[in-house]
Image (tube, rainbow, N blue to C red):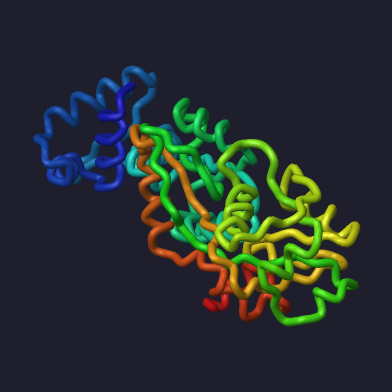
Amino acid sequence: MEFRQLRYFVAVAEEGNIGRAAEKLHISQPPISRQIQALEYELGAPLFNRTPKGVTLTEAGRTFLQDAQRVLAHASLAVDRTRAAHAGEIGQLDVAFFGSPVYLAVPVALRAFQRALPETEISLTRMGKQEQINALRDGRIHIGFARFYPVEPDITVEKVADERLFAAIPQDLALASGSEVTMADVATLPLVLFPSGDRPSFADAVLAAFAEMAITPPVHSTAVDTTAGLALTASGKRCSIVPESVAALRFPTLRFLPIADCPIRAQIACAYSSERKAPILEHFLNCLHSISLDPGKFATQRDTDSVFEIEKKGI
């Protein structure tokens, strides 16, 4: 049985006449008649009653018509989905992240992409930066997000946002009572850095900012990640420096104050293979380039609204 036979059969059944079906299909009548006869022979049952005015379906023909229409509809859907997958309009986008970009930039970008292409699926995995680079080369992920990446000849790194830096200070300390602090103020408390692990990192950027100001802060420790760093900061008379998206979080016993004279901003970057650009990645990059991931866009209502509520309101 061939798809051609099914198409001919359905056309004749819908038209009730072989001549009109031939016109609809833009072919002559004899091929249709031969293929329907071959189909009836294979099925072992007549599908049509021949009349002087055309044809009518037999009981077997009415039953077969329903299934034939479903088969052709599924075949058409398969073609459409295959073309959509080739164009990157469906399928799965595999994303990795490291560190605090997951608090704002990553979910906002993925939400915009999902709204633009709702039939796509998204996989999100935490990976260290070197692991991301290896996964990009192997084709296990399409794109990664972090703050700093090492320079690699086959990996494209794009900056997607810049964030102001804030000081995280236990709320029972006098330094937390103001509306802002300076780099010198921050250096009066033992500093908790994060993250540990792959270099370059956010911890390196923080130390570079102090060096630019000719200030040497007392470093208490380096935590494995943002959450651990904030927990350690909240547990004693210490402070840490965090990006603006982290300052938008509610963390028990901590206040987040802008650093008035901080000489740097914390970038958020994405990385993808320069050689492996799947169509779905191209769609995601177009979407990413069309939106703003500036945390200042969300700052005005961060005390009352969630990230997604703010984004929905278009602030």
Quarter holding residue 156: top left
Query: Where does residue 40 sit, x and y in percent of width and height?
Result: 32, 23
Which residue does the image show at 53% across and 46% down from the upper left? 148
Q: Work out which quarter of the rendered image holds the N terminus and state it.
A: top left
Q: Which residue occupies the extreme left position in the image?
A: 28
Residue 65 in view: no
Of residues 39 and 263, which is closer to you in this image? 263
Tell me which corner region of the image, top left, top right, bottom left or bottom right, holds residue 212: bottom right
Residue at left offset 88%, top offset 62% = 237
Across and down, in percent, residue 266 comes to 55, 59
Q: Is residue 179 above or below residue 154?
A: below
- Of residue 218 and residue 71, the one placed in the foreground of this image is 218
Q: In x, y percent, where is residue 120?
A: 49, 47
90 or 261: which is nearer to us? 261
Left or right: 153 with respect to 236? left
Location of residue 240 (image quadrant): bottom right
Furthest residue toward front: 214
* Image position, residue 256 (x, y; %): 74, 70
